[in-house]
């Protein structure tokens, strides 16, 4: 979350709350995402799903396509697999 927040810091043309969805099962990661949105001045509610979310769940949050997927090296294999599957289904390149 810190690396993602740093990528958005000082770039007013980017809005983490508008351009990202977090796939996370643990409350700590979700809370860090919320803090990052608060510090970066996000204009929308956070988009957060758990690892059992479907593509329809993500689309229901208003995100219809992804350009890029960032998956942390320290997530569980289950979360990694689900995040990868969601990203692929939504058209992400990375």
Image: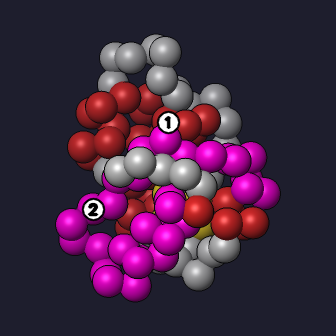
Q: Secondary structure at mark 2?
A: loop
Provide the residue designation for mark 1. Answer: 16
Question: In this orientation, which residue lies closer to the viewer: 32 or 87?
Answer: 87
Q: Position of residue 54 (x, y in %)?
A: 66, 73
Which image quadrant is residue 7 in?
top left
Its colouring scheme is: secondary structure
Horizontally, is 11 left or right of 38 in the view? Answer: left
The structure residue drawn at horizontal position 62% and vertical position 46%, both measured from the top left corner, is 65
Q: From this viewpoint, is residue 81 visible? A: yes
Q: Secondary structure at mark 1?
A: helix
Q: Which residues are magenta?
A: 59-88
Whether residue 43 appears in magenta in the rendering, the answer is: no
Up-down relation of residue 59 to residue 43 (above or below): below
Whether residue 80 appears in magenta in the rendering, the answer is: yes
Q: Position of residue 66 (x, y in %)?
A: 54, 46
The structure residue drawn at horizontal position 40% and vertical position 85%, both measured from the top left corner, is 78
Up-down relation of residue 34 to residue 38 (above or below): below
Horizontally, is 90 left or right of 71 in the view? Answer: right
Question: In this orientation, which residue lies closer to the viewer: 13 or 39?
Answer: 13
The Cα atoms of the two marked residues, 2 and 1, are separated by: 17 Å
Provide the residue designation for mark 2. Answer: 72
State which tag comes first along the sequence, 2 or 1.
Answer: 1
The structure residue drawn at horizontal position 49% and vertical position 15%, both measured from the top left corner, is 13
Give the residue furthest to the right. Answer: 60
Q: Are marks 2 and 1 in contact (CB under 8 Å)?
A: no
| Disc number for residue 82 | none
Q: Position of residue 18 (x, y in %)?
A: 60, 35
Question: In this orientation, which residue lies closer to the viewer: 52 or 6?
Answer: 52
The structure residue drawn at horizontal position 31% and vertical position 81%, both measured from the top left corner, is 76
């Amino acid at each position: 979350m810190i690396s993602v927040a740093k990528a958005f810091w000082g770039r007013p043309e980017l809005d983490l709350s508008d351009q990202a969805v977090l796939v996370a099962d643990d409350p700590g990661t979700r809370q860090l995402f919320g803090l990052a949105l608060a510090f970066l001045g996000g204009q929308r509610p956070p988009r957060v799903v758990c690892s059992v979310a479907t593509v329809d769940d993500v689309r229901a949050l208003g995100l219809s396509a992804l350009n890029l997927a960032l998956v942390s090296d320290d997530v569980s294999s289950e979360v990694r697999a689900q995040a990868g599957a969601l990203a692929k289904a939504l058209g992400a390149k990375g």
